[in-house]
Image (cartoon, grey):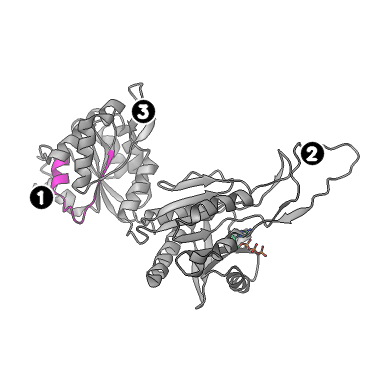
């Protein structure tokens, strides 16, 4: 289940051009199953109308601490009490300065101050001109807000509405959503370092041709994302796929199985968990032609011979840290039939504590999947569901296993 489902989010807008992105952010929050109460400062209303935000959130917008709609006339208290999180997006330089000082002279800063801070996180997405962002006063305010317990998100870099280029743009709505999810998700994998392989590999035949497979990488990317949401530090070694990098995840792109093994070797010593979801090619052409192999018109076909690729999972599982249990290894098995038998056999062959089986042709390229978890004790089924949901369930299962190991 998406952590935002049935959560109540107060979305606060302060004045800035990035208010236009708050409309999309509101839409994404509602789509994720959250209820959204929009609160706008007077400055924000110069950039986007409350009518737009009301239409998108499905609730009248609050703008004044003197609003008499609340029966107890205490909108500033009620709004904070009802919320699961207060998200300020965009947060202007001026608004952050006011928050840092604990000012309470208008509704939005008032409700931030009055919210039950231990229970309701305050998440801030700054947006401003690059000079304003870089100014020591702003950086001082950011440090103060963090010290006071607020989650100040980063800023984007690029072209700004003022025509300048640099740091200070508000993050894009999907990035803010990912960071908000991470704030609200129980930190089951906090301080764990997770290394994931994902996607297919590409085994070159010549400079333009190669062998690959139908793996989309979606399951591995979803696992990397879910692990990061749960507080892990995640490195994702990805074969050639066109998927966006999950927020907060460090990605290393590779092509061949040999490249993937080299990337994994470079990262694995720093990992506590290794999850091998990649569909690594079992074989590669024994020779890679330096130039494109041409048809010569004779009708003869090129004779390809193959060499076996290294088994990345088995290599990692044989490391002393894996053998001692310090590094927890998870294998995946994409089978076409007889899943249980093959998954059990593969777990023993790869020598890993947990093997996750799925039926390859039923999942390649799709957004949903069904998983079978096989360990020494037996099996657990995770029934068909979106990959994001299965990834979260797998992360929760892993956290239990790691807890048992500690
Ligand atoms: N794997 C790997 N390196 C390889 C082959 C596989 O790391 N060269 C990993 C996969 O990422 C997966 C697991 O091993 O976690 C199972 O891969 P799979 O290809 O299904 O198993 P194989 O051992 O190749 O067995 P078979 O092809 O006979 O099913």
Badge 1: residue crowd in 10 Å (few <14, some 14–19, many ≥20): few
The residue lying at 42 percent from left, 60 percent from top is 392
> Which image quarter: residue 140?
top left
Q: Position of residue 46 (x, y in %)?
A: 23, 28
Which residue is identified by label 2? Answer: 293
Q: In terms of depth relative to the viewer, which is nearer, 391 or 289? A: 289
| Residue 27 on the magenta span | no
Marker disc for residue 166: 3
Image quadrant occupied by the C terminus: bottom left
Which tag, 3 or 1, sits closer to the chain's start? 1
> Which image quarter: residue 169?
top left
- Residue range in magenta is 109-125
Q: In terms of depth relative to the viewer, which is nearer, 363 or 154? A: 154
Please state the total of marks drawn on the protein image: 3
The residue lying at 42 percent from left, 62 percent from top is 395
Residue with the most extreme bottom position: 377
Q: Position of residue 290 (x, y in %)?
A: 75, 38
Which tag, 2 or 1, sits closer to the chain's start? 1
> Which image quarter: residue 161?
top left
Image quadrant occupied by the N terminus: bottom left
Q: Position of residue 84 (x, y in %)?
A: 25, 54
Q: Is residue 216 visible?
A: no
**Labelled pair 3, 2 in contact (Cβ < 8 Å):** no
Query: Distance of mark 3 from mark 1, alpha carbons?
Result: 46 Å
Q: Is residue 208 visible?
A: yes
Which residue is identified by label 1? Answer: 71
Which tag, 3 or 2, sits closer to the chain's start? 3
Element marked by disc 2: loop
Quarter of image, ligand 1: bottom right
Query: Distance of mark 2 from mark 1, alpha carbons?
Result: 79 Å
Element marked by disc 3: strand
């Amino acid at each position: 289940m998406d952590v935002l489902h049935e959560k109540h989010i107060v979305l606060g807008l302060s004045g800035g051009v990035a208010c236009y992105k708050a409309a999309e952010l509101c839409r994404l929050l509602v789509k994720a199953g959250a209820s959204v109460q929009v609160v706008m400062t007077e400055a924000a209303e110069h950039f986007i109308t409350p009518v737009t935000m009301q239409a998108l959130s499905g609730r009248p917008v609050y703008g004044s601490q003197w609003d008499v709609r609340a029966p107890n006339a205490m909108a500033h208290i009620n709004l904070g009490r009802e919320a699961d999180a207060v998200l300020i997006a965009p947060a202007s330089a001026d608004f952050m300065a006011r928050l840092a000082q604990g000012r309470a002279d208008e509704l939005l800063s008032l409700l931030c101050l009055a919210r039950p801070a231990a229970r309701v996180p305050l998440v801030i997405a700054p947006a401003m001109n690059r000079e304003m962002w870089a100014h020591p006063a702003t950086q001082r305010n950011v440090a103060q807000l963090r010290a006071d317990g607020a989650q100040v998100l980063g800023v984007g870099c690029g072209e700004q509405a003022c025509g300048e280029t640099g740091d200070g743009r508000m993050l894009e709505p999907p990035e803010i959503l990912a960071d908000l999810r991470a704030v609200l998700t129980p930190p089951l994998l906090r301080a764990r370092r997770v290394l994931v392989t994902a996607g297919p590999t590409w085994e070159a035949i010549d400079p333009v041709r190669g062998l690959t497979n139908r793996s989309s990488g979606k399951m591995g990317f979803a696992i990397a994302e879910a692990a990061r949401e749960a507080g892990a530090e995640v490195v994702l070694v990805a074969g050639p796929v066109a998927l966006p990098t999950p927020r907060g995840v460090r990605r290393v792109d590779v092509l061949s199985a040999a490249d993937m093994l080299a990337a994994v070797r470079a990262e694995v010593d720093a990992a506590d968990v290794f999850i091998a979801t990649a569909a690594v090619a079992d074989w590669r052409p024994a020779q890679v032609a330096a130039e494109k192999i041409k048809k010569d018109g004779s009708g003869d076909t090129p004779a390809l011979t193959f060499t076996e690729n290294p088994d990345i999972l088995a290599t990692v599982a044989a490391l002393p840290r894996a053998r001692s249990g310090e590094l927890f290894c998870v294998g995946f098995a994409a089978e076409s039939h007889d899943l249980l038998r093959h998954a059990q056999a593969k777990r023993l062959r790869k020598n890993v504590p947990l093997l996750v089986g799925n039926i390859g042709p039923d999942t390649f390229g799709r957004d949903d999947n069904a998983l079978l978890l096989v360990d020494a004790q037996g099996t657990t089924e995770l029934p068909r569901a979106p990959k994001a949901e299965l990834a979260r369930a797998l992360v929760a299962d892993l956290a239990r296993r790691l807890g048992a190991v500690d």
